[in-house]
Image: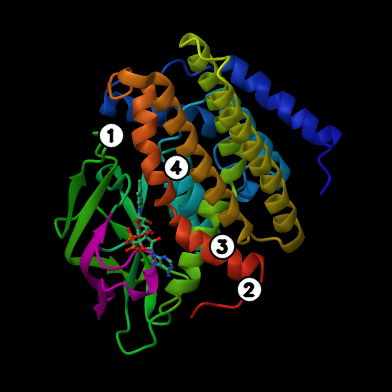
Amino acid sequence: MDLTLTPQEEAFREELRAWLADNRPGPEPESDEAAFEFRREWQRRLAADGWAGLAWPEDYGGRGATLVEQAIFNEEMATARAPEVANVLGLVMGGPVVIAHGTEEQKERYLGPILSADEIWCQGFSEPESGSDLASLKTKAVKSDGGWVVTGQKVWTTLAHRSKWCMLVARSNPDAPKHQGLTYFLMDMDQDAVQVRPLVQITGEPEFNELFIEGAYIPDENVVGGVGNGWAVAITTLMHERAGLAFGLQVALKIALGELITLIREHGLEGDPVLRQRLGQLYIESEALRMNAWRGLTQIMKTGVPGPEGSLAKWQWSDINQALTEFAMDVRGPEAPRTDSDWTYRFLRARANSIEGGTTEILKNIVAERVLGLPRMR
Ligand SMILES: Cc1cc2nc3c(=O)[nH]c(=O)nc-3n(C[C@H](O)[C@H](O)[C@H](O)COP(=O)(O)OP(=O)(O)OC[C@H]3O[C@@H](n4cnc5c(N)ncnc54)[C@H](O)[C@@H]3O)c2cc1C
């Protein structure tokens, strides 16, 4: 692992910093609706200057950035506290999956509107009875004239209420072994057979939804990667979900640590040896995360595809972020439960960190079996 940047990588960082200096997005509006439009506008600006599909090949509207450049990008965005993009699932998962497994027609049809955030994407994987054990999912797709009729229920579908397309995994062959009977579809959300009901989180936000699918129609041309190949395509999606995360997250943690120190000082607790010890421990852990992010990157550079190391970083990050936000609540003492503070919001939102994108227990299994090479449990 070589942590020194090349002159080209340094130039990339400088170019990005200059762009960010000229394109400061300003503060995000309060209301959900306005905040979403703000993120859409932000993504459009990024896309217009070639910063949206950073890792995508240039032929598909991306920048063809190297992995190190992507890492630099994530670091700089976090440092600048840039807003999230509106179509995060489309950019991080949908686009890469269509690029890896899609037909030329699919690439032509879908990639442009993902980049510009004109069409928002969601991920319809989890079901009430199938989360960690995704391959057991029951939503069924039955062959019909020129397409498929889909019936079932999905849950925790982030951004479904704003989405045009859903990356949907459904059981197309009930007689095949469970991993082989699945197909990956792009489902048009804009049909009466798809009902979206919001689920309000502990933070009060309706960030995700339940999907009730009662005979939705999906044409054959919206199958990605071939009928019966849904598991392999879904795994590509999940690997991309975890791969690029670590760099932005470790910078965001460092920023949050700085804010925590300010909070400790505001409460006059900076001399407390127990708090100092706890803070030091968090700092050490966030440094370890940074090093692991580089280690994961080195692995991807060797093998060409994101590997299981992304799971380690995601697990570490959720542990540290939860510990950090709990620490802030302790420092705030009796005022901690007040909901008008950003710290309370962060504390509540952090509860989901060890569940979303794969639970910590599942990530530990992946690290044990596929990073450390320990024997499989099952
Ligand atoms: C904020 C948020 C956003 C989300 N967005 C989406 C989305 O957009 N699309 C989508 O499809 N899903 C989404 N999810 C769902 C998420 O992927 C699932 O919640 C997650 O995979 C866990 O599945 P589950 O909730 O069914 O829990 P379960 O799989 O039922 O797990 C319950 C508990 O058992 C443990 N467990 C299960 N199996 C094992 C095992 N083999 N070994 C050890 N422990 C085990 C788990 O770790 C957990 O503690 C989101 C979740 C959250 C919190």
Q: Secondary structure at mark 3?
A: helix
Disc marking residue 88 = 4
Q: Secondary structure at mark 4?
A: helix
**For the residues bearing labels 4 and 1, Cβ distance under 8 angstroms:** no
Residue type (three-letter) at the residue carrying disc 3: Ala
Residue type (three-letter) at the residue carrying disc 2: Leu
Name the side, left or right, on which 13 lies relative to 46: right
The residue at the far front in this view is: 273
**For the residues bearing labels 2 and 1, Cβ distance under 8 angstroms:** no
Local packing at callout 3 (Cα closer than 10 Å; few below 14, some 14-19, many 20+) is some
Name the side, left or right, on which 78 lies relative to 233: right
Residue topped by disc 2: 374
Residue 131 lies within the magenta run = yes
* Residue 135 pos. (x, y %): 38, 74
Residue topped by disc 1: 203
Disc marking residue 18 = none
* Marks 2, 1: nearer the viewer: 2
